[in-house]
Structures are given as structure tokens and as C-alpha cells.
Image (spheres, rainbow, N blue to C red):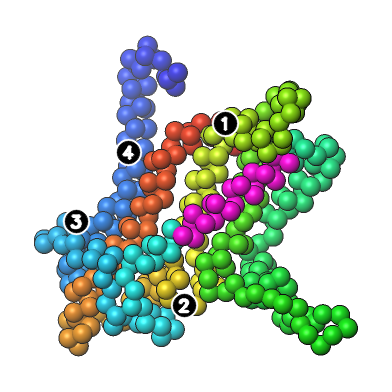
Amino acid sequence: MPLISEIGRKKLSVRALLIAITTILWIGVALHLFPVWWMIKTSITPTWEVFDAPAKLWPSKPTLVCYKLIYYFDPGWTGAGGNSVVYPIYVYIKNSIIMSFGTMALQIPITALVAYALSKLYSPRLSRIMFLFFIGTMFIPFSVRIIPNYLILRHFPFPTLNIPKIPFTDKKFPTHNFLNTYWAVILPAAYSGFNLLLLKGFFDGIPDSLIHAARIDGASEIGIFRRIILPMSRAVFAVVAYFSFSTAWNQFMWPLAVLHDNKFFPLSVVLYKFQYFLSQGTFSRELYPAQKEAMEAGVSINGLMAISIIESIPVFIAFIIFREQLMKGIKLRGFK
């Protein structure tokens, strides 16, 4: 139903108001899209033209040389901390994909099963207590959790500086070091309090009569979850999958803290190190031949914009895939 009826729109004052509102909205859209346009324009601009003044709205000689960084990265580039990054960008894209899909594969089933247990298995009183416990994790800041999480991954399963000894012996408990592996990023994300809130809010709306009827027919709890809960919860799972993927793909601080080898870096960390490297340099046409060759190959501001576009594409594709279910998910109880 339109905000203003067709009859009301015939009035001159109402029509002028609609034109003004539409104009303001289009200006807002243009202001939001201009940075995206500028990023795309810079990514296809030759290196030395990027620094020309005044800036142009379109490059005189567009080039895709920066996108060659996907399969070729100049080994002469040195990132922050003196670590030479000699891997092409597709290696870091692969790392981001592994970490993102690994997080989804672990986080969504665990969180969904916890939400189902709280919604349909526990008594109302116990469910309320357990729900408050699980949701309470959302109130712990990441800055508070980073050191315990780091220590527990350093010598799993003990979140302490020193490994304790086995009682009545001089031997220490066996531990495992997950740092500098994909698991260091995936394991701490195995549970999400926000996704639990969404899933439980939806599961509470599923009639208990369906669950009781399935139990009378002899279905197990896993069978009920697989044959009844999952088919009825596609919209909320699409929302959870999108949030899980986008969060895992864009995370930066935690991978930076637990990954030390360049070959494990996700694209977000490489983007930061690339930006840090560029901030330390001085851009001049009087450079050593190797530096000049690297900049002409895209190791400059235009290359930074190209990598930024590459990083944003998967999240955009995920939104396109889940957009229909996401629109339905807006009506879910968890979003009210």
C-alpha cells in the first residue's frame, strides 16, 4: 500500500513534497555509491595517474594490471614486521575461503543443536537458565576474551601461561598447539550467541504438537531435527549462514593475533599489511628500477583498491544467493 494515495498525489503541494523527498533519497544513494565508484575507478587507473592532480572521474588509459596480483605477487614487496610476502593473492583468497566455510561448517550445526535443545528439550525453567548462560557470552567484549582464547589455543586445553603437571608426578599434561593453523581461527568461532538468539526465537514458534507426534511415531531427536525442524527453518538458516559467512570472511583482529606464517593469512590481514606497507613509502617517479617495476605491476594504491574489490565480491555474492531468504528472515521473531 503506497504511503500517499493516487488521489492525494494530484495536489501540487503533495507532488512537490514527493519530488523533494525523492531527490534527497537519490542524493543519498549517489553519496553512498560514489566511494564504490571511486574504488573501482582507482583499481583500473595506471599507478602514476593515481597521484595526478586534479583527480579524474575516469582514467585516461584504463588497465587491469592490478588484478594480475591475483596470480602474481612481486616477491620484492615486504610487509609489516619484515615478513616477505611472496604468495599471489589467490593463496590468501583460498585461506579466507577455508576459514569462512570451516567456521560455517562448525558453527551452524553446533549453534542450531544448542538452540533446538533449549527450545524443545529442556524444561522451561532449566531452558531459561541455560539460555541466559549462553546469551551471556555476547556481553563479554572481544578484548577480554582474546588473551584466554590465545592461551587455550597455545596449549590446548589449558588457558594458562604454564602447563600444569599431572598430580603426584613431575610430568606435564599433554597439550596441543593450534596457533598458526586454520583451526586457530575456526575453533573459537564454533559457537555464536547472536545466531543462537535468532535460531531459538524461530524454533520457539514451531508447534510442539509436531514434535510430540513425531516422538510418538518413534522418531529420534536427530530425526525430528532433520526431518521437521530443518525444512521449516530454511529462512532463519539462510540468515544465520549469511551472517556467519560475512563475519568469518571479514574478521581481522583474531587472525592477525594467532597466525604468524604468511601462507596462512586471510585476505583481510593481507589487505591491512598491504595498506601498512604503502603508508610507509614515499611515492615518487625517482625510484629504484625494482621499486618502479613493482609499482607499475600494481603494488600501489590502485592495487590496494583492486584487492579491496576482490575481498568484497564474495560477501556480495552471498547476499545475492540468500537475498530472498534474507527478506523473509526480516519477519522472523528474532528480528522483531
Q: Earlier in the sequence, mark 2 or mark 1?
A: 1
* Quarter residue 75 falls in: bottom left
Q: Does the magenta portion include 109?
A: yes
Q: Nearer the viewer, mark 1 or mark 3?
A: 1
- Residue 168, x across and y down, in percent: 88, 83
Q: Are marks 4 and 2 in contact (CB under 8 Å)?
A: no
| Residue at 41% from the left image edge and 15% from the top image edge | 5
- Residue 316, x across and y down, in percent: 38, 47
Q: Earlier in the sequence, mark 4 or mark 3?
A: 4
Say which mark, if any, is on residue 231.
Answer: 1
| Residue at 82% from the left image edge and 36% from the top image edge | 124
| Residue at 72% from the left image edge and 77% from the top image edge | 174
Amino acid type assigned to the residue bearing label 3 in the image? Leu
Q: Secondary structure at mark 3?
A: loop
Question: In which quadrant will I find the C terminus?
Answer: top right
Q: CA distance from mark 2 to mark 3?
A: 39 Å
Instruction: Determine which residue is flagged by label 4.
Output: 26
- Residue 175, x across and y down, in percent: 69, 76
